[in-house]
């Protein structure tokens, strides 16, 4: 989660600078990297949730209710982290799409300006 927040800050500062074409392209790449990192973290948490469920069932079958409840509490904690990661991924995707739109608009403007210069 921390990585995603860091990448968001980098992308915001990169898109406000001088050469907007290369800055937005770099920011888009950083957003994709951050998204990939979050996806890996998400997969890891899913594996941990599955492991906690299996352990809880094992403890429950052995009559160890307290240990089973502890596993379920950890599972819920991991699920909460998954929700946070999902929100962060959505934010990254929204920012990436916005930056891609900025690139498209910039390129369109450049083409229109070149066409206008040729006609004058």
Image (spheres, rainbow, N blue to C red):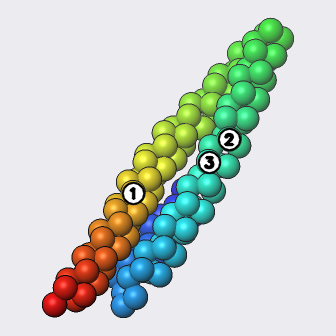
Quadrant location of the N terminus in the rendered image: bottom right
From the viewer's perspective, is the residue at label 1 or at label 2 nearer?
1
Query: Dot 3: what SS?
Result: helix
Q: Residues within 10 Å of mark 3 (few under 14, many from 20)?
A: some
Q: Is residue 4 left or right of residue 62?
A: left
Q: Which residue is mark 2?
A: 43
Query: Dot 1: what SS?
Result: helix
Rendered location of residue 77, percent (x, y): 57, 37
| Distance from the alpha carbon under mark 1 to that under mark 3 | 18 Å
Q: Which residue is mark 3?
A: 39
Q: Quadrant of residue 50?
A: top right
Q: Residues within 10 Å of mark 1 (few under 14, many from 20)?
A: few
Rendered location of residue 39, percent (x, y): 62, 48
Q: Is residue 23 left or right of residue 79?
A: left
Query: Dot 2: what SS?
Result: helix
Residue at 40% from the left image edge and 63% from the top image edge: 100
Q: Quadrant of residue 52?
A: top right
Q: Which residue is mark 1?
A: 97
- Disc on res. 63: none
State if disc 2 and disc 1 touch (CB < 8 Å): no
Q: Is residue 23 left or right of residue 34?
A: left
């Amino acid at each position: 989660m921390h990585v995603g927040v860091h990448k968001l800050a980098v992308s915001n500062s990169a898109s406000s600078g001088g050469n907007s074409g290369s800055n937005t392209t770099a920011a888009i790449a950083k957003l994709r990297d951050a998204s990939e990192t979050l996806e890996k973290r998400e997969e890891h948490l899913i594996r941990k949730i599955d492991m906690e469920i299996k352990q809880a069932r094992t403890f429950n079958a052995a009559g160890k209710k307290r240990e089973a409840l502890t596993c379920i509490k950890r599972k819920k904690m991991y699920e909460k982290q998954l929700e946070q990661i999902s929100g962060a991924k959505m934010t990254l995707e929204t920012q990436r799409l916005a930056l891609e739109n900025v690139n498209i608009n910039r390129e369109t403007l450049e083409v229109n300006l070149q066409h206008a210069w040729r006609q004058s």
